[in-house]
Image (cartoon, rainbow, N blue to C red):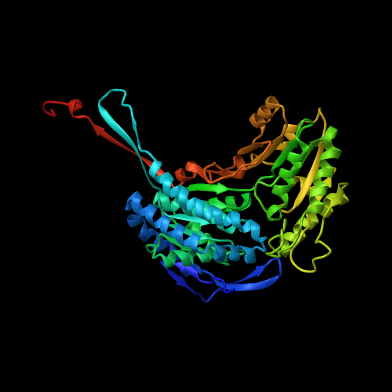
Amino acid sequence: MEFPTRMYLGGTLRNSATTLPVENPATEQVIATVATADNGHIHEALEHAQAAFPMWSQTSIAERQNWMRRLRDEVVANEDYLRLCIHHEMGRPWASTQEDFDSLRNSLDFYAEEIARLNDYSLVDRAGTHRHRMVHEPAGVVVAFLAWNFPLLNLAFKLGPAMAAGCPIIIRPSNDTPISAYAVGELCERIGLPKGVVQIVATASYEAADLLSSSTIPAVLTLIGSTATGRHIMRTGATSIKKYSMELGGNAPALVFPDADLDLAANILCGVKFNNAGQICVSPNRVFVHRDVLENFTSKAVALADQATVGWDRNADVTTGPVINRKARLRIKALVDDAVTKGATLLAGGDRPAALDRGHYIAPTVLTDVTPDMELYRQENFGPVISIIPFDDDTPLIAAANEGDDGGLTAYVFTNDLARAEDCAARLRYGEVQINGVKYDIDLPHGGIGQSGIGHDCSNLALQDYLVLKRVTQALPHARPSGDAT
């Protein structure tokens, strides 16, 4: 298969003198060499976006909806192509590429409809002398920095609301997974999207990447990535007043109480942990299990780890693919080794499966007796590794779950005691608390608190990140003063 390699810049597909090899982490083979942006390309992209803003922001909602639906139709017509890009650039099992594809289609559909439901509103004037309207307007040029773990899903979460809001957007995909984003650029070019409305440029230059955030042209900087990256972008973005929308990291806890449905808890937690090789921002990193059910829960988790199928064969029912690169595999293995050295018990996995002689694989891994002095406890491992921490009735559980991060993305609670569940939800410092299940969709807000983010992806709340409010006040005729201005 020939993969897309050209940037989408100023309405055209472009090659460049600087390039970047992209490796399939399942085979460790380079599958494409893509064009990347230098400083000149970045300045050009910013200028195109700035020039497009007056036109795009003033287009009618109906016209924006039309462009979004034309792009949606082109996305649907190229489903296999887009999914193959993800399958190869991430080594992602074929079945799980469906989620990425569906997210792009659903985002374009949802925000094309949601923008039409957005209502300006009136304010009551206490003196009765004026009429006031609050009007939503596009914020301005958007720059989006994307993580690699869900290449199309992450792009979709930014593209849909920005287009709907009337904001030109420059998308910088991850250097690990630029191919599917470049494929979307091809589709934008194919439908003749107006110049500068969407641009997609990868760059291997940190200096060029920083130009995107340090420029005074963007009004919105949005990111899916680590907390450290979020801080860096905010620092470089401080050249002007900007809006920020960021989904950042989080060391997600799961609390399994003695009255929980253990089959349900094990299936959900292992499912979220082993799917996409655990490279999910909301994956449970620390699983706190009450000692009364510790052995039972652990045996279920180990069985699910042992049953998981690891690999990349498109025609096989694969549970877990590779992690993104060699560096990630070595980092995850080092976290596991550190935990075992400090007293954790390794019950499943821990390294590359013996049957696979290449690829950046980590077998689904289960450890118990994990303690706070271990790096695995303190760090988001971003791999297919479940860390089980026993607790007793006198353990300060909520304090432990909240420990180490001023906020977070997601926490999980498994109990059949509704009062206990609600108490946990009230005290856990996380943007989402999932009780006895897990649910994500384009219409449900997704965001962290504290060091795990600003703003939201998905839902109508995400649309607000790309809009500003203007107050329009008009004096009522009967309230105008009469007589001379003397």
Image quadrant holding the C terminus, namely top left
Q: In which quarter of the view is residue 190 placed?
A: bottom left
Height in image: 49 above or below 4? above
Image quadrant holding the N terminus, namely bottom right
Q: How many marks?
A: 0
Can the viewer see residue 81? yes
Q: In which quarter of the view is residue 45 placed?
A: bottom left
Report the front residue among 313 and 443: 313
* Residue lying furthest bottom: 17
**Residue sitting at x 69%, y 64%:** 315
Residue 403 placement, left or right of 107: right
**Residue sitting at x 50%, y 75%:** 16
Residue 227 placement, left or right of 238: right
Residue 421 placement, left or right of 177: right
Can the viewer see residue 241? no
Report the front residue among 296 and 208: 296
* Residue lying furthest top: 127
Residue 149, given in percent of the width and then of the height, sits at 63, 56
Report the front residue among 306 and 236: 306
Height in image: 275 above or below 416? below
Residue 18, given in percent of the width and then of the height, sits at 55, 74
**Residue sitting at x 77%, y 40%:** 263
Residue 468, given in percent of the width and then of the height, sits at 40, 43
**Residue sitting at x 61%, y 58%:** 97
Residue 435 placement, left or right of 36: right
Residue 440, given in percent of the width and then of the height, sits at 59, 44
Height in image: 441 above or below 170? above
